[in-house]
């Protein structure tokens, strides 16, 4: 359950009410920007569950197993080995890795299976990133 600070409509209401004592117009612009960001992260209405799974996959790459194994400090995802190897070997590399993780997930307990499936999503994302770089 999200708190009121994560409700984009409540943030927008706060910006419109102009909290007494705060006259800085930049503050209110930041509140509107934060509300827009929350809407973006939550995804379109009725797709919140998909957005949540996508966030979990991104967090795994940015802070979990992906970062521990593959990322140097501050290295962008598209410069990490997952994308660099894809550029050299083609889309078969990340898609094959994704399929392997999907198969492996079937023999694991729930939490480990979810972790494998999130990893598979990140391999598919690497394939999409490299594909989108093509002219």
Image (cartoon, grey):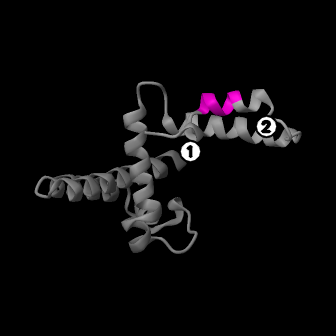
| Residue 96 makes an appearance in the image | no
Corner quadrant of residue 59: bottom left
Residue lying furthest left in this view?
107
Depth order, front residue of 21/94: 21
How far from the left and from the top, in percent, is residue 28?
79, 37
Q: Residue at x 49, y 33 (%)?
A: 43
Up/down of 60 relative to 38, above or below? below
How far from the left and from the top, in percent, is residue 81?
44, 68
Disc 1, SS? loop
Residue lying furthest right in this view?
23
Would residue 46 appear left or right of 4 to someone viewing this image? left
Quadrant containing the C terminus in the rendered view:
top right
Would residue 111 appear left or right of 29 to someone viewing this image? left
What crowding class fits label 2: few (fewer than 14 Cα within 10 Å), some (14-19), or many (20 or more)?
A: many
Q: Which residue is mark 2?
A: 28
Question: Could you say which disc has been placed on residue 135 in the image?
Answer: 1
Between the C-alphas of marks 1 and 2, the distance is 40 Å
Q: Residue at x 38, y 57 (%)?
A: 90
Residue range highlighted in magenta: 8-13
Question: Could you say which disc has been placed on residue 114 in the image?
Answer: none
What crowding class fits label 1: few (fewer than 14 Cα within 10 Å), some (14-19), or many (20 or more)?
A: few
Disc 2, SS? helix
Q: Residue at x 85, y 41 (%)?
A: 22
Q: Main secondary structure of the magenta part?
A: helix
Depth order, front residue of 76/110: 110
How far from the left and from the top, in percent, is residue 66?
40, 66
Lower sequence index among marks 1 and 2: 2
Up/down of 94 relative to 80, above or below? above
| Residue 56 makes an appearance in the image | yes
Quadrant containing the N terminus in the rendered view:
top left
């Amino acid at each position: 359950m999200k708190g009121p600070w994560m409700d984009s409509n409540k943030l927008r209401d706060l910006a419109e009410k102009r909290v007494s004592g705060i006259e800085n117009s930049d503050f209110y612009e930041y509140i509107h920007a934060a509300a827009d960001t929350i809407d973006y992260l939550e995804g379109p209405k009725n797709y919140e569950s998909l957005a949540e799974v996508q966030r979990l996959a991104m967090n795994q790459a940015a802070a979990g197993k992906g970062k521990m194994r593959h990322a140097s400090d501050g290295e962008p995802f598209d410069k990490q080995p997952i994308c660099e190897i894809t550029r050299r070997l083609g889309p078969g590399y990340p898609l094959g890795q994704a399929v392997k993780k999907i198969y492996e997930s079937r023999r694991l307990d729930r939490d480990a299976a979810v972790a494998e499936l999130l990893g598979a999503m990140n391999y598919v994302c690497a394939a999409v990133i490299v594909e989108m770089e093509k002219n």
